[in-house]
Every structure is written in structure tokens, then in C-alpha cells.
Image (cartoon, helix red, strand yellow):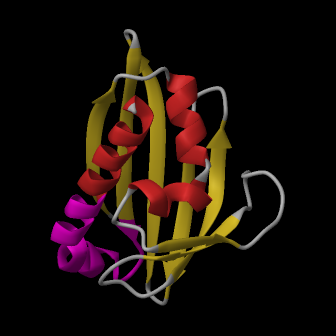
Amino acid sequence: MRLVSTTIAIQAPPDRVWAVVCEVERWPEWTSSVTSLQRLDPGPFTVGSRARILQPKLRPAVWQVTELDEAKKSFAWISRNPGAQATAVHVVESDGAGSKVTLSLQFSGLLGPFMARLYRGLTERYLATEANGLKQRCEA
């Protein structure tokens, strides 16, 4: 398994940041790492929710929420491909008057180590782009 992670401080309360993170269908408005995102299920964003995401330089992928903890302000979702699985985790924590956000992506499965090496640079750029876009959105 290979993990890529980034952490950013955001000068906004955790509840505000968490609300923006969980409104996934609006991500293309504030991060250029997501071209389009379509929720595939009606209703609230919860465990089992699915979304089709299109990102530059990547094939469309379906992500499904596997963990969501409102109290801890964290969620994880996975995207499966033959031989590999990607798990993305979003965590919002209190940090003084603001928030600390950690975004991570982990590859697993038979082809996981290969995918992690192949996409490491792109993954690092996209996580940084998402973190910075989230910061700008929440601090505006």
C-alpha cells in the first residue's frame, strides 16, 4: 500500500470547512483537479453514497463512501479498478480559531504499488490543488 497525504491550515471554523467538503457535487467550482462530479444517489451524503468523478489526465471513476463520521468530521471513499483500489480520506480538525485539513490517497491491491508509483506526482499535485482550492473557498 502506498499513501500520499497533504495537510493545510484554513482560517475558517471546522463546521464551515466540513460543510464545503461534504458538498461534493460543488467541488468543480473550487478545485481544478475535478472537472466534473455527479452524485449517483439521491439524498444525503452518507456511507454508501456514490459519485462519478472526472479529473484531468484520468479516466472517469466511481467513488463510494465507505466511512463517514460527522462528529470527527471525516470521510473515506474508494474507487476500484481491476487489480487496484484507491482510498481517499478527508479529515477536518479544529486548529485554534481555524481548521486543519488532511487529504490523503492510498493505493492497495495487486497493482496498488505500481499505480502509486505511476501516479505519485499527479496525486501530489491534485491533493495540493484540492487543499488550496478548499482553503480559498472557505476563507472567502
In which quadrant is the N terminus drawn? bottom left
- Give whichever of 121, 86 is nearer the camera: 121
**Is residue 74 visible from the viewing direction of this image?**
no
Q: Is residue 70 magenta?
A: no
Where residue 111 appears, as percent x and y from the top left, is 34, 83
The quarter of the displayed image where residue 114 is located? bottom left
Report the side of 10 relative to 89 (left or right).
left
Residue drawn at (24%, 52%), measured in percent from left and top? Answer: 128
Q: Is residue 119 magenta?
A: yes
Count numbered badges in the picture.
0
Where residue 120 appears, as percent x and y from the top left, is 20, 69
Reply above or below: 134 against 79. Answer: above
Most extreme residue toward the front is 140
Report the side of 48 relative to 74 (left or right).
right
**Is residue 52 visible from the viewing direction of this image?**
yes
The residues colored magenta run 107-126
Where residue 118 appears, as percent x and y from the top left, is 20, 80
Residue drawn at (36%, 51%), measured in percent from left and top? Answer: 104
Residue drawn at (38%, 35%), measured in percent from left and top? Answer: 101
Reply above or below: 130 against 59. Answer: above
Report the side of 74 relative to 68 (left or right).
left
Most extreme residue toward the right is 43
- Give whichever of 107, 138 is nearer the camera: 138
In which quadrant is the C terminus drawn? top left
Magenta stretch: helix, strand or loop mostly = helix
Where residue 106 appears, as percent x and y from the top left, is 37, 61
Most extreme residue toward the top is 96
Reply above or below: 54 against 140. Answer: below
Residue drawn at (57%, 32%), measured in percent from left and top? Answer: 73
